[in-house]
Amino acid sequence: LSERLGGVFDRLTKQGALSAEDVKTALREVRVALLEADVSLAVARDFVKAVEAKATGQAVTKSVTPGQQVVKIVHDALVDVLRGAEDPGTLKIDNPPAPILMVGLQGGGKTTTTAKIAKRLKEREKKRVLMASLDTNRPAAMEQLAILGAQVGVDTLPIVKGESAVQIAKRAKQQATLGGYDVYMLDTAGRLHIDEVLMNEVQAVRDVATPRETLLVVDGLTGQVAVEVAEEFDAKVGITGVVLTRMDGDGRGGAALSMRAVTGKPIRFVGVGEKMDALETFEAERIAGRILGMGDIVALVEKAQETLEAEQAERMMKRFQKGLFNMNDLKGQLEQMLKMGGMQGLMGMMPGMGKLSKQIDEAGFDDSVLRRQIALINSMTKKERANPALLQASRKKRIAAGSGLEVSDLNQLIKMHRQMADMMKKMGKMGKGGALKQAMK
Ligand code: GDP
Ligand code: MG
C-alpha cells in the first residue's frame, strides 16, 4: 500500500496551493487505505468528502509534495474525529458508590476489561472497587471474574446461585453502599449477537443501577459488526463510552473511526492483550496513525513545517539584529502572536517589551485585533510595507476602507509599528555587543 501511495505522491510534486486535482488524486488512495483499515464504506466516503472540501486551496509546505500535504491534512482530520473526550482515561465516578455498567457481545472482552479497569482505578486513583458478574447463563463466567479479581486484588461480589441479573445488580449496589466502596462494576452477560432478551436484561439492570458510566466493550478487529453493535447498544441502552479490545492484533482499527462517526461516543480505552495491565488510555493520534498507515509521511510533513518555521524565525531575528523592522516584519510578528495564542505571551517574552506589553493589554487587544491589523498590512503595497512613511492621507483612507476599518485603526497600527521599530533599533545596537542575541536565546 505504501508503495502505491509513494507512487502517487511522486507524481504530485508541484508547489504552491493544493489544487482540486491534487487533492482528489491523493484522496482516492486515502479512501482505499481507510477501507483496508476496516473503516465502513459510508464513513470513509463522508470523511473523504469533508477533507476534500477542507484541503483544496491549502498551502503546500516547502519541500513537501502536495500528496504528502494531503496525507497530513487527512491525519489531522482523523485525529479531530477520533478525539472524543477531553480526558478519555478519566471516568465519571464521583459520589460513591458509582456504578459502571459493562456491556457488549460475548467474547468481546467485557470480563477481562472489567478487571483491567478495576485494577487501574485501584492503582491509579486509589479507589475501592467491587466487581459483580451478572452472567447468569454461564457459571464459568462468574468464576472467571472471581479469579481475575483475586489476581488484581479487587473484591468481587460473592456468587449466589439462582439469582437473576437484576437481583445481582441490586445486591451489588447494596454491598457497595454498606461496604464503603467508591465504585461498583457490573459485568453483564453477552450473547453471540444482539437479541431482544439480552437487550431487555441489560435495560432492566440499567434501570436498577442507574450507571454513571456505561461502557461498551467491542472487539476492535470486527470492523463493521462492531459499529452495528455500538449503534444498537447506544440506541437501546445508551452508552457513555467505548473500549476497543484486541488492538494488540494486526488489525488497523478502522472500527474506531466508524464508531466515532456513527455514535459520537468517546473511545476511552483500548485493550492490547490478555494480561491485566494490557489496557491503554485511548490516544487519537496513535490510532489515527494506525488507521492511515502513513506515519512516515505525517512525520515528514511535520518536520518540514517545523524547519520552515525555524527558518522564518531565524531570518526575522537577523533583520532585527540589523535594526530592521518594516510592516512585513510586523505582520510576521502578528501572525506568530496569533499562533501562540495572543499578544501578551509573545511580548512578555521579548526583552524590553514589558512596557509595550502593558499598553497592549490596556488597549484591550485580542485575536480579532490582530486579525484586523494583519488585514490592514495586507492592503498596503509592497513599497508601503517596506517604508510606512510613504503612507499619505488618501492612501490611508483607501487602505482602511479596503479592510473595512477606520483610518484611526490604521494610525494606531502605524504608531505601534514605529514604537516597535524604535525598540528594534535600540536592541540592534545592543545586539552588536551580542547582548541581544544572548537576551533572546
Ligand atoms: P466477554 O465474553 O466479553 O466477557 O469476553 P472475555 O473478557 O471473557 O474475553 C474473551 C477472550 O478475549 C479472553 O480469552 C480474553 O483473554 C481475550 N481478550 C480480551 N481482551 C483482549 C485484548 O485486548 N487483547 C487480546 N489479545 N485478547 C483479549
Ligand atoms: Mg464475560
Image: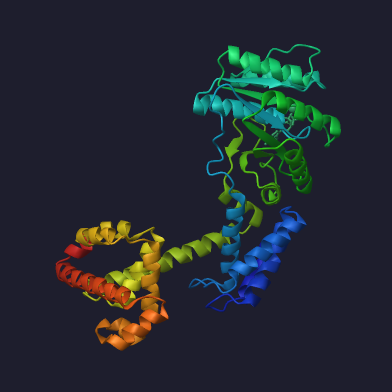
Left or right position of 123 against 250: left
Picture layout, residue 243 above or below residue 372: above
Q: Quadrant of residue 339?
A: bottom left
Q: Inspect this view and state whether residue 19 appears.
A: yes
Residue found 85% across the figure and 33% down from its top: 196
| Colour pattern of the rendering | rainbow
Q: Nearer the viewer, residue 381 or 288?
A: 381
| Quarter occupied by the N terminus | bottom right
Could you say where residue 113 lies in the image, as x and y percent from the top left? Answer: 66, 31
Picture layout, residue 29 above or below residue 256: below
Residue found 57% across the figure and 44% down from its top: 85
Whereabouts is ligand 1, in terms of quadrant? top right
Left or right position of 274 against 107: left
Residue found 79% across the figure and 14% down from its top: 163
| Quarter occupied by the C terminus | bottom left
Picture layout, residue 61 above or below residue 361: below
Residue found 61% across the figure and 34% down from its top: 278
Could you say where residue 110 lies in the image, as x and y percent from the top left? Answer: 71, 31
Could you say where residue 260 lies in the image, as x and y percent from the top left? Answer: 66, 49
Left or right position of 319 against 373: left
Q: Inspect this view and state whether residue 350 appears.
A: no
Left or right position of 357 against 222: left
Could you say where residue 165 lies in the image, as x and y percent from the top left? Answer: 77, 21
